[in-house]
Amino acid sequence: MSEDLRNSLKLWAGSIAFIGISWVVLRSNLLGDVPTEWFWIGIGVAAIWNLGQFGWGLWQRRASKLG
């Protein structure tokens, strides 16, 4: 199994798990009195953080191939 395939599988599994856990937390009211808006703000911050890390990794890969 190539490294790219392994990373893709990890990304898909992580995304599905993240969505599933988020759905369970929202549906079961595990957060208690935390407003739903705060939950979605947290999800947005996590998504932006992950996209930033992804972009940084692509930039580093590009820089390492050029140098």
Image (tube, rainbow, N blue to C red):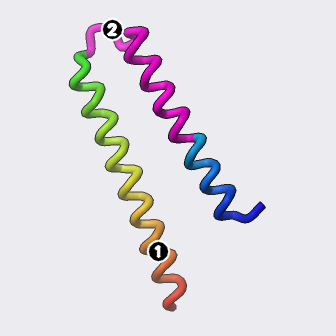
- Residue 25 falls in image quadrant: top left
Give the residue type that dot 2 points to.
Gly
Q: In this picture, is 27 found above or below 38?
A: above
- Characterize the magenta stretch by its predominant secondary structure: helix
**What residue sits 46% from the left and 17% below the top?**
24
Locate residue 10 relative to residue 51 in the image: left or right: right
Q: In this picture, is 27 found above or below 6?
A: above
Percent coordinates x, y for residue 9 in the rendering: 64, 50
SS at circle 1: helix
The residue carrying mark 1 is 60
**If the image is split into quadrants, where does the N terminus sit?**
bottom right
Residue 32 image label? 2
**What residue sits 36% from the left and 42% below the top?**
46
SS at circle 2: loop
Locate residue 30 relative to residue 65 in the image: left or right: left
Percent coordinates x, y for residue 14 in the rendering: 55, 41
Dot 2 or dot 1: first in sequence order is: 2
Residue 32 within the magenta-colored segment of the rendering = yes
For the magenta stretch, what is the residue range? 14-34
Locate residue 66 relative to residue 41 in the image: left or right: right
Number of marks in picture: 2
